[in-house]
Image: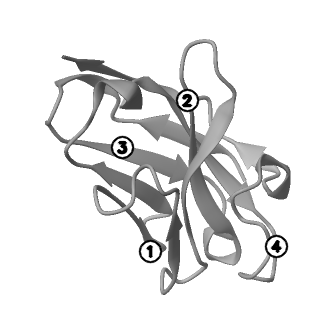
Amino acid sequence: VQLQASGGGLVQAGGSLRLSCAASGRTFSSYIMGWFRRAPGKERDFVAAISWAGGSTYYADSVKGRFAISRDNAKNTLYLQMNSLKPEGAAVYYCAASPSRRWASDKSSRGAYDYWGQGTLVTVSS
C-alpha cells in the first residue's frame, strides 16, 4: 500500500487542523493505521492508531482528548483531527500502515508498521 499524507500547515496555538492520508490499493481496510510525528531534533513518536474498521482507537497520552483519529475505508483515507494544538505539537506528521492481525499488539511501536507516507509539516505559532 502507498500512503500520501496532506493537510499540514501553519496554525496558531489553540487552533485546529485536520490531516488526511490517502492510501492506494484495495486492501486499505486490512491494515491497522497509525499517525506518528517527528519534532525537530527528536525521534519519530507515536500519536494515534485505529483498527481495521475504525471501531477501536488508541492515543498517546500527550494528545488524548485533543486529537481524534478516524478512517473512511470506502475512500481509502485516514484522518487526524487535531484540536487545541500546542507549540510542542509542531512536527512532521506521518501516516503508517500495519499488517498486524492483532489489535492487542504493540501498535504504538514504529516497528509494527511496514508502510509509511512521506510526511506533512505542521507548524504551530505561539
Whichever of callouts 1 and 4 sits on the residue coming sooner in the sequence is 1
Element type where label 1 sits in the image: loop
Residue highlighted by disc 2: 119
**In the rendered picture of this protein, how many numbered marks are placed on residues?**
4
Residue highlighted by disc 1: 74
The alpha-carbon separation of the residues under discs 3 and 2 comes to 10 Å
Whichever of callouts 3 and 4 sits on the residue coming sooner in the sequence is 3
Whichever of callouts 3 and 2 sits on the residue coming sooner in the sequence is 3
Residue highlighted by disc 4: 100
Considering depth in this image, is 76 or 78 the residue closer to the camera? 78
Question: For the residue marked with disc 2, what is the amino acid?
Answer: Gly
Question: For the residue marked with disc 1, what is the amino acid?
Answer: Ala
Q: Report the side of 74 relative to 96 (left or right).
A: left
Query: Do labels 1 and 3 touch, CB within 8 Å?
Result: no
Tell me the quarter of the picture where residue 25 sits. Answer: bottom right
Whichever of callouts 2 and 4 sits on the residue coming sooner in the sequence is 4
Label 2 Cα neighbours within 10 Å, binned few <14 / some 14-19 / many ≥20: many
The residue depicted at 82 percent of the width and 58 percent of the height is: 112
The alpha-carbon separation of the residues under discs 2 and 4 comes to 22 Å
Tell me the quarter of the picture where residue 13 sits. Answer: top left
Q: Report the side of 42 relative to 35 (left or right).
A: right
User: Residue 92: horizontal and vertical position, in percent?
Assistant: 51, 25
Question: For the residue marked with disc 4, what is the amino acid?
Answer: Ser
Element type where label 4 sits in the image: loop
Residue highlighted by disc 3: 19
